[in-house]
Image (cartoon, rainbow, N blue to C red):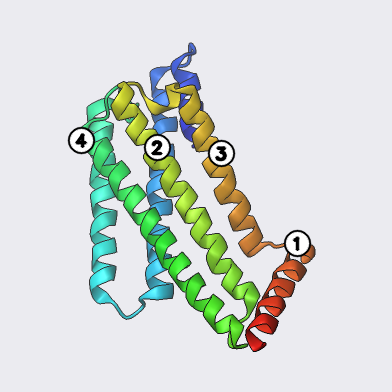
Amino acid sequence: FGSMMVGMALLGSSAPPLAAQCAFAFGSLSACCGVVAQSVFAWRVYHPDSRVLLAGIAAIGLALAISLGLRGLQSGSVPRALPDTSTLAQSALQVGCLLWASCEALRYWRLMKKRERIGMADPVVGNRFLLWGIAAGAAGVGSGVGTLASLALAVPSLQIPWVVFSSSLHGLTAAVAMSLAFMPPAGYLRWVRSQGTARSAVSAL
């Protein structure tokens, strides 16, 4: 997202067009790599024995690579007022993969909550599934909002102020959730454990 904003700023400056194109291309490539990595992570954690799912992820990765190449050829990776076919395909795949990863994490979080009540799961681990689900879901919703707004208004999403605000808010939500999942403060861990203890105590009554 940051690289995209840089590209948009370069478009309105005296910088060479190639500079903006490179910024947009880097942003798109980073987003696609992140989505594929997110999908591989979800496959490895939730369905590691599914060869069909792994093949599907490989096909998505190939489709994203093709869409990136087509965007480069069609518009130099610069967003158009009305998204072209390759841009829509890329956005649909990105949103679909992120929301799938979110659903998988939230589904497992619900399973972990049930196990917590009988003392068979660590509340911290369960909370990390929740946070990962929130992070992936926020990223997916933010991407979807931008695409739909661009289609409805026939304006590149990064030129719509409320979409930029929405994307920033969803990105911040995802960043905070991932930070709490992988680098949680001690106070947050104590709170999560205390909530798990309280749920176990209620279930024991």
In the rendered view, would you say 193 is above or below 76? below
Q: Nearer the viewer, residue 176 or 60?
A: 176
| Nearer to us: label 4 or label 2 | 2
Crowd band around label 2 with a 10 angstrom C-alpha radius: few (<14), some (14–19), many (20+):
some
- Describe the element under mark 1 as helix, strand or loop: loop
Location of residue 198 (image quadrant):
bottom right
Q: Which residue is mark 2?
A: 145
> Which badge, 4 or 1, is on the more N-terminal residue?
4
Residue type at numbered disc 4 = Thr
> Which badge, 4 or 2, is on the more N-terminal residue?
4
- Describe the element under mark 4 as helix, strand or loop: helix
Residue type at numbered disc 1 = Pro
Residue type at numbered disc 3 = Leu
In the rendered view, would you say 97 is above or below 75? below
Q: Nearer the viewer, residue 192 or 18?
A: 192
| Nearer to us: label 4 or label 1 | 1
Q: Residue at horizontal 49%, vertical 23%?
A: 161
Q: Which residue is mark 3?
A: 169
Q: Nearer the viewer, residue 121 or 54?
A: 121
Q: Which residue is mark 4?
A: 85
Give left or right: position of 131 versus 147: right
- Describe the element under mark 2 as helix, strand or loop: helix
Residue 30 appears in the picture as rendered:
no
Measured Cα–Cα span from mark 4 to mark 1: 44 Å
> Which badge, 3 or 4, is on the more N-terminal residue?
4
